[in-house]
Structure formats: C-alpha cells, structure tokens
Image (spheres, rainbow, N blue to C red):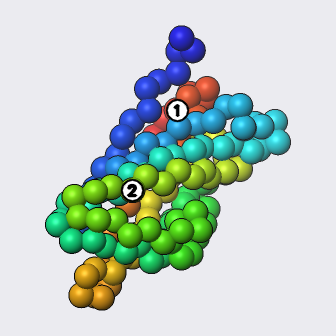
C-alpha cells in the first residue's frame, strides 16, 4: 500500500445523461522539479434514456492553482464521436498536464439525439489534487 488517498468519483446528470469522472494524480508521469504535474481521468457517460445519442463535441475548462484559464474545444473525445445506445454507457480516458501542483476542470459535451436535435451535457467540476503536497489554507 502506498498511502495515497482513494480517488473520488464526481457525477452530474443533465438531459438524461449521467457523467461520472474519476481523476487520479500520476506521480510517475509528473516532474515537479520542472513544474510538470500530470493527472489522468476516466469519464463514463451513461445514457439513461432508451434511444441512442451521438457525441459530437467537447469543451473543457481548466484552471490551474493560480487560476490561469485553459479552454479546449474539439470534436468528440479522443478522436472518436461515439454513438451511445439507450441504457448503455461509454468510457473515455484522458489526461491533463499543469504547471502547478493543483487545479480543477469541468466541461460540456454536445450530443445529437434521434431527432437530430443538439443538446448539452454538463461534466461536473473535479479537482486536480497532488496528494504529495499539503493543501494550502484558504
């Protein structure tokens, strides 16, 4: 056992779609001496409805510890635009490097339903925490 805290799951449900996020600090990929800190995260998208939906785009909003803003726009996730059947789910894994030992991220996923109508789904805000560094007092 390493003594690292158990990763925490963050969830949000919007328009019949639940998004679960599990962020993990990756010490072996980070280089604090070079101000490079890396987190992986797994996102599971649950289609709670009974008809298929099509993920067309994403918008990530990332803040580092100094509140510097980074925005990422793109089509689909990891180069794919999955179709998620009714009552099914899709898992997406990715990562985020920062120049500070902590930060936070949230986002919006854009879908098209079976009527070809676009709708947005919220990705809950989740923290990037380095368990090797004590939290700053607020």
Residue at 33 percent across and 81 percent down: it is: 112
Give the residue at x 39% y 36%.
Answer: 8
Q: Is residue 10 visible?
A: yes
User: How far from the left and from the top, in percent, is residue 36?
Assistant: 74, 45
Q: Secondary structure at mark 1?
A: loop
Q: Give the vertical position of 121 relative to 134 (above or below).
A: below
Label 2 to label 1, Cα distance in Å? 33 Å
Q: For this view, does 18 lie left or right of residue 102?
A: left
Image coordinates of residue 13 in percent, x first then y, are 24, 59
Q: Examine the image and state in which quarter residue 73 appears.
A: bottom right
- Residue 76 point in image, percent of width and height: 50, 71
Q: How far across and how far down the image is residue 5, in percent? A: 47, 24
Q: Quadrant of the C terminus?
A: top left
Q: Residue furthest bottom?
A: 116
Q: Secondary structure at mark 2?
A: strand
Give the residue at mark 1. Answer: 135
The answer to whether residue 37 is left or right of residue 62 is: right
Would you name the residue on which mark 2 appears? 90
């Amino acid at each position: 056992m390493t003594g690292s805290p158990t990763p925490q799951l963050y969830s949000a449900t919007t328009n019949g779609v639940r998004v679960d996020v599990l962020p993990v600090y990756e010490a072996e990929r980070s280089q604090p001496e070079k101000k490079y800190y890396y987190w992986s995260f797994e996102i599971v998208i649950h289609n709670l409805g009974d008809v298929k939906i099509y993920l067309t785009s994403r918008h990530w909003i990332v803040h580092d510890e100094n509140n510097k803003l980074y925005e990422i726009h793109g089509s689909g996730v990891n180069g794919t635009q999955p179709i998620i059947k009714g009552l099914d789910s899709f898992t997406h894994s990715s990562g985020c490097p920062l120049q500070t030992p902590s930060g936070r991220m949230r986002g919006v996923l854009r879908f098209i339903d079976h009527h070809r109508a676009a709708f947005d789904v919220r990705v809950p805000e989740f923290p990037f925490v380095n368990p090797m560094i004590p939290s700053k007092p607020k």
